[in-house]
Amino acid sequence: MSRNSHEKTLAALGVTQAEQVAPLFAHLLSQANADLNAANSAETFEKFRVHWFGRKAGVVTLVGDNWLKPAVRELKPAVGQELNKFKAQLEARMEARRAAIESGAEQAVSAKDRVELSLPGVLRPIGSRHLIRQVFQEIEDIFVSIGFSVVEGPEIETPYYNFEALNIPEFHPVRDDMDTFYVEAANESGSQTPPGSLLLRTHTSPVQIRTMERQKPPVRVIVPGKVYRRDNPDATHSFMFHQIEGLAVDTDITFCDFTGTIEYFVKQYFGPSVKTRFRPSYFPFTEPSVEFDVSCIFCGGSGAAANGTTCGKCKGSEWIELFGAGMVDPAVYGFVNYDAKKLSGFAFGMGMDRLAMLKYGIDDIQAFFQNDVRFLKQFP
Ligand code: PHE
């Protein structure tokens, strides 16, 4: 019997006797079972449902339209009974199939999502603090232990704070050493700042001014931070590097307090066996100004390397230049409304990168900024 028997009437199928009706439905049911067994997913099941039970053109509807309705009197009861039986049987099987497909889908999903607890898992490398950060912390700890507090200031500065208020007027020759990057940015109201009115600070010294503007003496602060200069990169230069500024101002601070503080710091940082010395120097915002040196930490201040040749680090000079410092120039107090007659103080500005390089034996400042994991891993 053909697959589309339900599209014809019983008369057209040659069914005239009641006995012929049951085999007709049996055949239909075997077709439906075959279709149902092939439906193994939600999509194929839905196709099955539409084909057999679709309201308008499903097989069951068509059987009703083509077989039952036009059936002759003698056949109608048999066709009606068989059709009801057929529907009930097929519906029961269909429900069972639907349940099987749904639970199968659930199992498939949970198998995919299941966590395999015996696998070793993904070990993600744990990062560490950059050496520069570690050294900042080390130096901050030393100064905090003797009564200094830590403050910070902006990296984008005005020429006033970076130069003028530090007693460096326009066209002063030291500005040549501190050539920097000028930035033009939109200010709060959205308009462009005039050219030359903002720069990347060349040192942390502007925070001296900002601190004294903000608080009355006594002042004891250190200022860690990034600074910028128009330098070409090489083993000892970078257009961005780090400084730590120090400032102490009070009514009775002497040059002795100054050298004593520096010496304490240097011995804490490099170890008690190092010696310090200072040489006269010049900064517009300190008077007198000095350059602090430490006895060479590589040759122990002897000037000679282990094999008897000249120490390559201090070049036989026995000393290594550390940083600039001095007593605060009274002119600076004038910019912050401090009484220069009553107050005195000292300031220093240390190159952080240099201090880290000396202590940890690093000979190229660029290593700090290349972020090569092989380098970083050495300072966990
Ligand atoms: N700001 C100076 C520099 O960057 C260093 C310094 C700071 C010198 C404080 C004296 C006092 O070169």
Image (cartoon, rainbow, N blue to C red):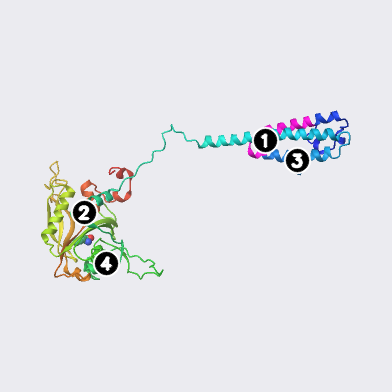
Residue 240 placement (x, y as % from top left): 29, 57
Q: Residue 161 shows which numbered tag?
A: 4
Q: Secondary structure at mark 3?
A: loop
Q: Earlier in the sequence, mark 4 or mark 1?
A: 1
Residue that carries the numbered disc 3 in the rendered image: 58
Q: Earlier in the sequence, mark 2 or mark 1?
A: 1
- Depth check: give the residue in front, 251 or 256: 251
Give the number of marks: 4
SS state under label 4: helix
Label 4 and label 1: CA atoms lie apart by 83 Å
Per the model, the C-alpha gap separating discs 3 and 1 is 17 Å
Reading the image, the residue beneath label 1 is 95
Mark earlier in primary sequence (3, 2): 3
Residue at the image position 74 percent from the left and 32 percent from the top: 31
Type of amino acid under label 4: Tyr
Amino acid type of the residue that numbered disc 3 sits on in the rendered structure: Gly
* Label 4, ligand 1: CB separation under 8 Å: no
Circles 3 and 2: CB atoms closer than 8 Å: no
Q: Is residue 39 visible?
A: no
Quadrant of the snapshot with the N terminus? top right
| Residue carrying label 2 | 144
Q: Are marks 3 and 4 in contact (CB under 8 Å)?
A: no
Residue bounds of the magenta highlight: 25-45
Instruction: Classify the position of the C terminus by image quarter.
Output: top left
Specify the quadrant of the image occupied by residue 323: bottom left
Judge whether 168 appears above or below 295 on screen.
below
In the structure shown, which secondary structural element does the residue marked by tag 1 occupy? helix
Mark 2–mark 1 CB contact (< 8 Å): no
Q: Residue at x 71, y 41 (%)?
A: 50
